Image (tube, helix red, strand yellow):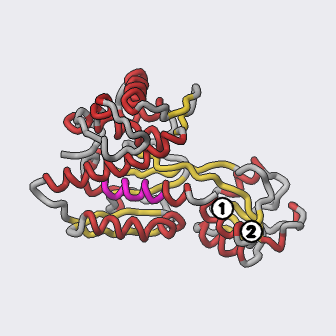
Amino acid sequence: MSLGYQSSRLLNGTLCLKNLYPLHEAVSDEFDQIRVRDLVFFDRLAALGSITATARELGVPKPTASRWLAVLEQRVGQSLVRRTTRHAALTERGRSFHARVQEVLAAVRTAQRAAQSTEPRGTVRVSVPVPLGRMVGGPVIAGFRRELPQVRLEIALQNRRVDLVRDGFDLAIRGGPLEDSELIARRLTTVPLWLYASAEHQHTASADLAIIGAPGDEALLRRRRPDLQRPSVVVDDRSAVADALMHGAGAGILPGFLGEPARGRGELVRPDEQPLTSMQVHALYLPTQRDDPRLQILVDGIDRELAATLSSRP
């Protein structure tokens, strides 16, 4: 049995959480009726930040998703989400509850795998952008090995866009706009992209700043910062852009998780008060592998590490 979103046996299951949610001591009978389906829904709602997007991903009507949330909040006895017409953000109680939900879902998946007659084996090949791979690769690899010791994991850290079928990959982690395709796309997070400058250039006039760019940056800067020069160096790895800026090369665009640690050390500065844009990060895989437990475990691990790492950085 799989934790895929179409598994009705799992989504309709009921789980007692009395010992796993310490927000209040008096736990009602209603709390014991929380379903695993509700937890899967709430976990994806926390990741996507939209009831509409969550309903679409789970393949249910939006009114059904809204009803699930209302019932969950009733059973928990707490307001978990602040809703606007377009967004849904977790309350403080919601964030605390979500941390426990992730633990429960991980335990459920472990129980499922223990009940399976055959332990997953074989090889899983995944393509990951270099900056993201460097950021979360270590913990993800260690966690995957603990959960699936019989599965060989091959990770290619590369910034080019791969074709899963042609290039023989099972999974691709991709940042930026997605092309139309039949691939399943699970959104993992949204990363802000800021303009950073070497600390020694914080007083340099914009028109005099040398720009170190990545592919696509020239068009973005032309729209958002036309006062800047066109990139004098273009490199297809934002980790290399960050290294160049920390060595005094000038200015360039970096995701917050690369730029903020160096900014905290005084090596980089942010000329602007707002990010230039943001980048969505997705996990892509073939529809035929929707219920592959190896991919689900790997994507869940990447999702958790991204959330933990990005939430700990400004």
Label 1 neighbour load within 10 Å: few <14, some 14-19, many 20+: many
Residue 214 seen in the figure: yes
The three-letter code of the residue at mark 1 reads Leu
Q: For the residues carrying marks 1 and 2, which lies nearer the camera in this image? A: 2
Left or right of residue 188: residue 253? right
N-terminal-most mark, 1 or 2: 1
Residue ID at (55%, 37%): 89
* Residue that sits furthest to the bottom in the current view: 247
Marker count (numbered): 2
Q: Which residues are magenta?
A: 297-306
Q: What quarter of the picture does the N terminus occupy? A: top left
Please provide percent x and percent y for residue 247.
73, 78
On the picture, is 88 further left or further right than 244?
A: left
* Vertical arrangement, residue 271 with respect to residue 91, above or below: below
The C terminus lies in quadrant: bottom right
Identify which residue is drawn at 83% across, 66% down.
Answer: 209
Disc 2 residue type (three-letter) = Leu
Residue 183 image-quadrant placement? top left
Residue ID for mark 1: 254
- Which secondary structure is most common in the magenta stretch? helix
In this rendering, is residue 195 above or below 16?
below
Task: Compare residues 34 and 255 and report the one nearer the observer.
Answer: 34
Q: Position of residue 144 (x, y in %)?
A: 31, 65
Q: Position of residue 121 (x, y in %)?
A: 19, 64
Circles 1 and 2 in contact, beta carbons < 8 Å:
yes
- Would you say residue 298 sits in the magenta stretch? yes
The residue shown at (84%, 67%) is 202
Q: Dot 2 corresponds to which residue?
A: 268
